[in-house]
Image: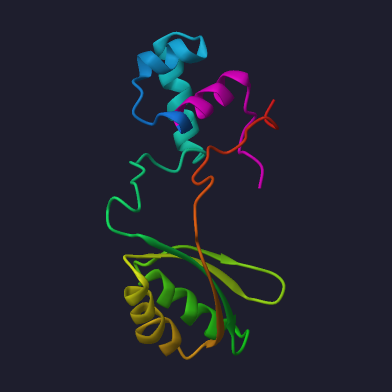
Amino acid sequence: MTPIREIDAIDRRILEQLQRSGRITVLELAQQVGVSASPCLRRLRLLESDRLIKGYGAQLDRERVGLGLAVFIAVKLKSHGDTESAGFRHALLEMAEVIACYITSGEHDFLLRVVVPDLSAYRRFVLDKLLKLPQVKDIYSSFVIDTIKEDAPLPLQHLK
């Protein structure tokens, strides 16, 4: 999907700066991108209304908030019908442990990113929630040993 409107170099710099620091003031942002505050605010509002900026929020340290175990779970469904797939998706939306879900091609149908406090909590999540879904045929888990890069800013060099 391409952006709604043409993104110029100033818009790109605004987006890059906001990815680094979402709490930056409009005045600081304007100085960083080389425009005055009023046009910067106008551009910022346009970027928000075009939904290029999805929102602002704090990035929490997963381990410091007690979610020490991160797991990627590949899920294969029993059937690929619309009803089954929709039921599975709806159930995932209700599971706070699932912080990301992707429909994938290849051997598995979905890839989940799950965070829980520990292995015991993971076991409860899998046995009491995930495997109880009637749509699930198989799951394959990969445990995160260490994180090298996470939640990095999106690369915007392709925008003119």
Is residue 7 shown in magenta?
A: yes
Q: x%, y% of residue 128? A: 35, 85
**From what the image shows, is residue 101 above or below residue 53?**
below
Q: x%, y% of residue 28? A: 38, 15
In the picture, the quarter occupied by the C terminus is top right
Picture residue at 70% right of the left edge, 77% below the top: 107
Picture residue at 49% right of the left edge, 9% below the top: 35
Q: x%, y% of residue 16? A: 53, 28
Picture residue at 33% right of the left edge, 41% below the top: 58
Residue at the limit of the structure toward the front, as seen here: 145
Picture residue at 47% right of the left edge, 91% below the top: 134
Question: How many numbered discs?
Answer: 0
* 111 or 55: nearer the viewer: 111
Colour scheme in use:
rainbow
Tell whether 98 sits left or right of 149.
left
Is residue 64 shown in magenta?
A: no
Tell whether 106 sits left or right of 94.
right
Q: Quadrant of residue 76?
A: bottom right
Q: x%, y% of residue 102? A: 56, 64
**From what the image shows, is residue 9 above or below residue 154?**
above
Start-end of magenta stretch: 1-18
